[in-house]
Image (tube, rainbow, N blue to C red):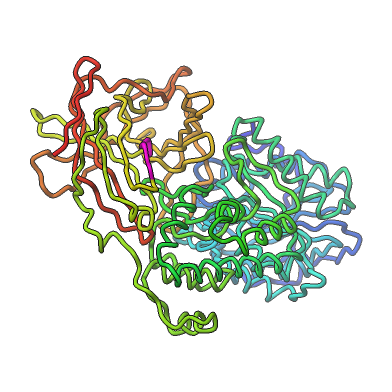
Amino acid sequence: MKKLLAISMAFFMMCSLVACGGDATDAGGIPVTSTMVNTDTEWAIYWYLCGSDLESSFAAATNDLAEMMEVELPENVQVIIQTGGANLWQNDVVSAEKAQRYLYDSEGLTLIDEFDPVNMGDPQSLTDFLAFSKENYPGKRTMVSFWNHGGGSVTGAAFDEQFGMDSLTLAEMYEAFTSVFEENPDNQLIDIIGFDTCLMATVDTAFIFSDLGKYLVASEELEPGNGWLYSGWMGAIAENPKIQPLELSKAICDTYVEGCELVGTEDTITLSVTNLSKVNNLIDAYDDFGKEALANAVEDPSFFAHFSKIAASIENYGGNTREQGFTNMADLGHLAKKSAEYLPQTSRKVLSALDDCVEYKVNGKYRPESRGLACYYSYNGDIDDFNSYSQLGAGEAFKHFYAYGLTGKLSDMGMEYIAEMNYDSLPELLSLNRVGWEDMPLTVDAEGCATLTLGEEANNILSSLTFELYYADPDEDIMLCLGSDNDIIADWDKGVFKDNFRGVWGSLDGALCYMEIAYEGEGYNQYSVPILLNDEEYNLLVTYDFNTEEFYIEGARKPLDESGAADKNLRYLVEGDKIQTIHYATALSDDSDELMAVPIDTITVTPQTVFAETELGDGLFIMMFAMQDSQRNVVYSAAATFESVEGKIITTVD
């Protein structure tokens, strides 16, 4: 386990902690060190360390600083660190009252600059740090590393807790980097651009930095709170200061796995190394991929339903449910692989280009489809989120494809784009708004299954079909939502769907839980379970492995916050934790359908705490099929009622 240095940071104090004087001043008006440019430096690492609540609540930045300081660096390796963005630093050295810059080298840790706090989510703050580091601490090899939360292509990284969780978007990062480093696709000046954050291994990130850096090291998925293993990869530099950028990038990945294995967080990790000099070929293939998708949609709008079903079945990252929030990031390679039947002309080109530019990757057993870079897909149908993406993302064709799919129309620019593809009009989209399936009646078949019959048209309209399950108590006038799942017997070709109600549901130590299906993988399902963990809102993340037929608790994360920051700190359950299960309830007599969150059971975590299926027992249960189209319209079927009496289930429908 990492050393928690919140008590005293004793060995920090053994290092040189000198605020050096000098004649020069920086933007804050504070004297800074007058440095000699050391052209013998093999590696200069510029570490943008935005602590945020990860530091103030969990000492995560302190832990990584401690890991770094386990490594004795040689004279020709230097780490320049800017700290900020946290309301509290859990050590005796770094101050939340100042923005500070440190040098870590063969002499230890030295405070070289400090000034009034600056917003780490402001591009000018990043510009100033990069300019300061480049001028005063150049090296033959340069790495720029971000440490913080990450939110993916739309919201970026470096969320500053002191400035309203403002973050650096990709556009703002580009602004800062190009102010300091010249764009040069033939000779990028930065050897490695790293993100020890969540969700930043995207095709859009790679595109932004393609003319600035040689390699991108980042994660598609949420990173666990332990993050990169700094003693590991910095140890690789200390052992071989002339290490090449690709080898160092691989060392970051390999030691990341080692660090995660030490604390048991390896099952859902991803980390990849992208050769940025080869990204332009990927962007070309990705745009052609989008163009073929757009052509299919314009010729036959039912393509949106088929593409949406593919997107729902591929690896997606950061949580894309109502409870978790929506990051709208999915694996590009998995999308291309599963689209081969519908997009045969371009899907293989995307896979080939990905394999060419993603030179190394690691992934856990529950992220088997990670190909190294994620892409945007609108899982929630939020127009504002899409509009933000459309201003910065790579691939023009997909922007028009999503605009048409979400709104049913295109801008003048979009119409000009499809005109160049020899299309002069857009057909009307197929949607649930047109077919009248709200409260669609059910029947009961010979086996006693509640059956929804929609016909062949369902395959051309629906992007997904799940069910919601409720417990009903007429005497108490209450209906309690147990959650959603995809355990349905489905014949998509005929449009016939049947329940598979077995009288069981997920529970924590026997207490029934609200559980919402988050992802259907090959051989496993993942669920999000809202809870109060020691009185704070979290989502318990659980995986059902079809091979072992058991649930596995990954941990708990806070929902995506309003700023778009995904929670990097995967919280593990520890003995003594108090958990309250959350359900959503309404009165049976209430016609408003409004559900209220209600804490139900309280569990004290023990070493034997498990998530498992449990018998629902006798009672009355209500199920409705939930139909969703590619525009994220949702309608519900009529209700089926399951009355369970002494193990026998009687199904009736209205």
Observer-nearest of 538 and 517: 517
Q: What's the residue at 87%, 51% (across, down)?
A: 243
Can residue 536 be seen here?
Answer: no
Residue at 66 percent across and 32 percent down: it is 261
Residue 531 among those drawn in magenta: no
Secondary structure, magenta segment, majority class: strand
User: Whole-percent x and y of residue 67?
Assistant: 70, 40
- Asked which quadrant contains residue 410, the reply is bottom left
- In the rendered structure, the answer to whether residue 521 lies left or right of residue 612 reads right
In the orientation shown, which residue stands out farthest toward the top? Answer: 646
Image coords of residue 621 (percent x, y): 21, 30
Q: Quadrant of residue 251?
A: top right
Give, as a single range, the part of the protein colored magenta: 486-491
Q: Is residue 519 at all visible to an observer of this figure?
A: yes
| Left or right for 537, reference 189 | left
Counting from the top left corner in percent of width and height, residue 404 is at 42, 71
Q: Residue at x 36, y 36 (%)?
A: 489
Residue at figure coordinates x 57%, y 37% from the top left: 366
Query: Viewer-proximal residue, 16 or 391?
Result: 391
**In the figure, 382 relative to 428: above or below?**
above
